[in-house]
Image (cartoon, grey):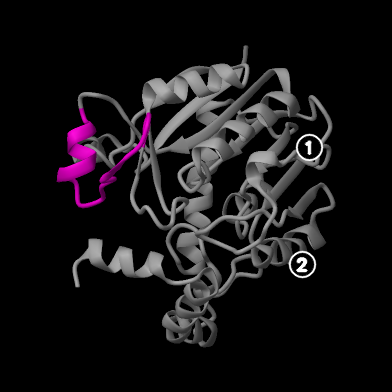
Amino acid sequence: MNKESLRKFWYSLSPNYRFIIRRLYYLPADFFDKIRGKRHKYVPPRGSIYTGSPANAEAYIEQGNQQLIWLKSHINLKPNDKILDIGSGIGRTAIALTEYLEPEAKYCGFDVVKLGVDWCNSKIGRDYSNFEFKYVPLFNDLYNTSTLKAEEFTFPYDNNSFNKIFSFSVFTHMQINEIQNYFKEVNRVLTDDGLAFSTFFLYDDANEHQISSVNAFKFPIKKEGYRLMNEDVKSGNIAIHKDTLSTMLNQGNLKIVKVIDGFWKDKSKYAEGVNYQDFVIFKNI
């Protein structure tokens, strides 16, 4: 079975089955990590890691530290900032921030997967009182079967609460109307002088054929201004045309500061040390 067929099979399963299969698949590795003392108190077992690579503790912490480097570089993240982590997952970035943020800083994260929120609150939140994780039961056909709609969701925070907002691999797994609503909410909770950082799969007219037909990691299903990897699991992966993204941000009273293309659509960029996904830095208009 090739990667494309395997991906289609994976998306055909229910979210619960995907979680179960992942846990069973990584059970031997988790067992050996434990008996060899390769675990870390804040890092979940590999089988519980549902976003990004299911790395061992050392690699997981390294990945979070790399994300912190990007945030410091691209949005000038400071140790005393007020931070919102959209899609906080199971703590990959938060772990790195525990050693960077000062006690007067504020970290808030929310996620649609209760497993991740419960883990983070029981581990990180227990040791760091300025870290708070919230579970929001929103429907996402990749991760859960909840009924609340992300396109109607209001972030559970006051206006102008954060001067730095970020998300890793969140807008790559949402539907277009949901992303538009999140942009509106980012505008509301971000301070006037604040900065936001998010990752996307982006394309333009010049590389649309490449990312839809040639790449092994491709988006064959064409929509108006964006492309999908799978019609049945619309949150599986989404690629957005750069013009569409600019329009969407503008409709949310946001504007692009900088775009940094990743190497997912151009392997030659791998040597430049960029991320797999595309980076977008944006702020309020």
194 and 146: which is toward the camera: 146
Q: Nearer the viewer, residue 145 or 281?
A: 145
Q: Is residue 255 above or below residue 109?
A: above
Q: Seen in the image, is 138 located left or right of residue 30?
A: right
The magenta stretch spans residue 219: yes
**Which disc number belongs to residue 267?**
none
Q: Which residue is mark 1?
A: 105
In the rendered image, which quarter is residue 84 located in?
top right
Amino acid on which the number 1 mark rests in the picture: Ala
The correct choice, above or below, for 270 with respect to 145 in the image is above
Image spot of residue 169 (x, y percent): 49, 46
Quadrant in which the C terminus is drawn: top right
Q: Residue furthest top?
A: 285
Q: What crowding class fits label 2: few (fewer than 14 Cα within 10 Å), some (14-19), or many (20 or more)?
A: few
Tell me the residue at 22%/41% (across/down): 212
Q: In the rendered structure, which segment of residues is drawn in magenta?
A: 207-226
Image: 270 above or below 140: above
